[in-house]
Amino acid sequence: MNLLTITWDMGRGLDLGFFTLRYYSLLFAAGFVLGYMLMKRIFKKEGIPIEKLDTLLTYVVVATILGARLGHVFFYQWDYYSQHPDEILKVWEGGLASHGAVIGIIIAIIIYSRKVLKRPTLWMLDRLVITIALAGALIRLGNWFNSEIYGAMANSSMETVFTNPTRERLMNWDEQIASIHFEQTNTTEITDTLILPIYDMQILYDNTRPINKEQVENRIEEDVRRYLYSFEKEEKNILITPGTRVRWDEQVENMAHVEVVGIPRHPTQIYEAIGYFLIFLILYRIFLNASLAERKGFIFGMFLVLIFGFRFVIEYWKENQVSAEEGLAFNIGQYLSIPCVLAGLYFIFTAKPYRHE
């Protein structure tokens, strides 16, 4: 394994006792807070009343969540949601698409610019996209914490083994399990293409209820292995290989040890977070350049080209999000990125100073 290999085995949030603070929610909110602070500086620089910023925040928050959700519904899983329309607005169950978020924000800014700001829509977009790039970096970091939208299997110089999905699946499947912890061993399993780390999966059973160790062993060695295998066909994270035996801890009561195989993946969420942050710096530097900042739609065009051009490339290292993407020349995210890049090129090459209007 590589020095930069990370085992993500910390759960998806901070348990406060009465409430679990999700890392993703925290970083999602942080993106809006930092974006608000940056837009406040921009509004002051442009001489716009700060009162209008609160209205802008409302427009952007609603547009981001609603647009991202509907984008996922229509772009990725319409076959499912067309049969389950009552689940479309269940945002808390997951399923957000960045392309949908951008469409939603553009529509919201068109309305905001006309009704509230009384300025050209592109003038507002040229400034807002700077904060969106920054928020995107934090949101992708949140995806990494949340063990979702991760990369394909690979032994790279920087990789992550995501254990959260397997833990949550098993704990939801067996209510007697109190906790599951993964500890990496010094051994590996070598295949034709991958070097797979071996983990000691420590399953702690509820000690307030009697357990039959023989039944537990049979379930782990047979049922759990088959259960994970069927799950891993779609989302490989941890594998329990045939012939796996259970070892009971001599120190901790009702703790079973199982040798399992971890699947190393490209942490594409980290790649994207770094990329979006660099794009944020580029866009902000352009904004500080008076001659470029005064070209109508130029920064917005650069945003579309850089964000979705980068998104198109990074998709080659990502796992397909839905089964419908299997066998396609490009995945859905790439197909959606192409028109965004073309639109960005149009705005860049047709950008003219505002004084020429």
Image (cartoon, rainbow, N blue to C red):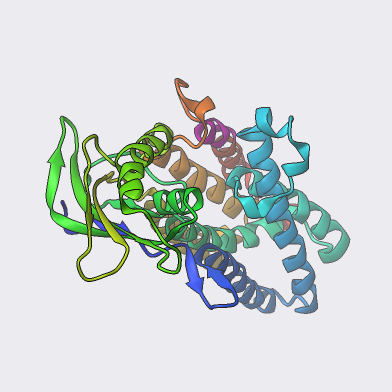
Q: Quadrant of residue 126?
A: bottom right
Position of 215 relative to 292 (above/below): above
Residues 299 and 206: in front is 206
Residue 41 at x, y = what percent? 62, 77
Magenta stretch bounds: 332-339
Position of 221 relative to 61 (above/below): above
Relative horizontal placement of residue 196, taking residue 268 as reference (left or right): left
Number of numbered discs overlaid on the protein picture: 0
Residue at 43% x, 53% y is 147
Is residue 237 at all visible to an observer of this figure? no
Residue 300 at x, y = what percent? 61, 51
Give the prevailing secondary structure in the magenta stretch: helix
Residue at 44% x, 44% y is 310
Q: Quadrant of residue 225?
A: top left
Residue 72 at x, y = what percent? 63, 41
Residues 11 and 132: in front is 11
Residue at 48% x, 72% y is 14
Is residue 337 one of those drawn in magenta? yes
Residues 331 and 207: in front is 207
Relative horizontal placement of residue 130, taking residue 231 as reference (left or right): right
